[in-house]
Amino acid sequence: MDQSKSCKTFLYCLSIALLLSLPTAQAQTTLYQQLGASAGVQAITADLIKAARTDPKTSRSFAKINEPRLIKLLAQQICLLSDGGCVYEGENMKVTHAGMGITEAEFAGLVEHLREVLDQRGISTGAKNELLKRLAPMKRDIVETTKPEAATTQ
Ligand code: HEM
C-alpha cells in the first residue's frame, strides 16, 4: 500500500517536472519571428515607406529619398530591435534625422502608418505593441520641433 502511494507521488512529481521543463511557445518565439522574420520585416518596412511617401501628412521628408536604401536600413534596424540579430549599417537616429525638422505630428503619422501596416499583415496585438514600445525611445532623437510651420519652411 505504502509502496503504491510513494510510486504515485513519484510519478506525479515526475510529470510536473517534465511539464516545467518544456519550453513555452513564448520563450521560443522572438519578436522578429512574430513579425515574419526576414521576409516579413522587409515587407512591413517597404509598406511603411510607401505609406509614408504617399500620405501628405508625412510625405514632405520622403520626397528625395533613396527608397531601396532606406528600406534596407530600416529593415536592418527593426530586425536588430526585434532580436533578429541583424547588423545595422546605417547612421544613428540623431545624426540621420538632424535638420529634417521632423514634428511631433509627423512622428505620430509614421507610427500610425506602422500600426496600420502591422494590422494589415496580421501581426498580433502583442507583437505590434512590443515593436512600438521598442521604437518609442527613438522619438527624442528624431523629433526636432512641435511646430508644424517650422517643417513646412524647409
Ligand atoms: C521610430 C521612428 C523612426 C525610425 C526607426 C527611423 C529609422 C530610420 C533609418 C534607419 C534611416 C536610415 C539611416 C541612414 O541613412 O543611415 C532613416 C532615414 C530617414 N528617415 Fe527615419 N526613422 C524614424 C522616423 C522618421 C520620421 C517620423 C520621419 C519623417 C516623417 C523620417 C524620415 C526619414 C528620412 C527622410 C530619412 C532619410 C532617407 C534618405 O535620405 O535616404 N524618419 N530613418
Image: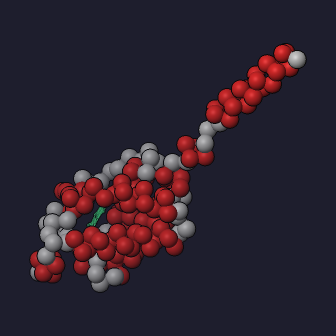
Q: Residue at x 27, y 57 (%)?
A: 138
Residue 132 shows up from this direction: yes
* Figure check: 64 above or below 129: below
Direction from residue 26 to residue 94 in the image, left or right: left
Direction from residue 70 to residue 43 in the image, left or right: right
Measuring from the top left, give residue 37's x and y in whole percent.
Answer: 52, 55
In terms of depth relative to the viewer, which is nearer, 147 or 49? 147
Farthest right residue in view? 1
In terms of depth relative to the viewer, which is nearer, 20 or 61? 20
In terms of depth relative to the viewer, which is nearer, 125 or 86? 125
* Figure check: 18 above or below 78: above
Q: Quadrant of ligand 1?
A: bottom left
In the figure, residue 114 lies in which quadrant? bottom left
Measuring from the top left, give residue 12's x and y in whole percent.
Answer: 75, 28
* Figure check: 20 above or below 148: above
Q: Residue at x 63, y 34 (%)?
A: 20
Q: Which image quarter holds the C terminus?
A: bottom left
Farthest top residue in view? 3
Q: How many marks?
A: 0
Q: Residue at x 55, y 43 (%)?
A: 27
Q: Which image quarter holds the N terminus?
A: top right
Q: Residue at x 86, y 20 (%)?
A: 4
Farthest front residue in view? 1
Measuring from the top left, give residue 46's x and y in whole percent.
Answer: 43, 69
In the figure, residue 65 lies in which quadrant? bottom left
Q: How is the image coloured?
A: secondary structure
In the figure, residue 48 lies in which quadrant? bottom left
* Figure check: 87 above or below 129: above
Residue 76 shows up from this direction: no
In terms of depth relative to the viewer, which is nearer, 41 or 2? 2
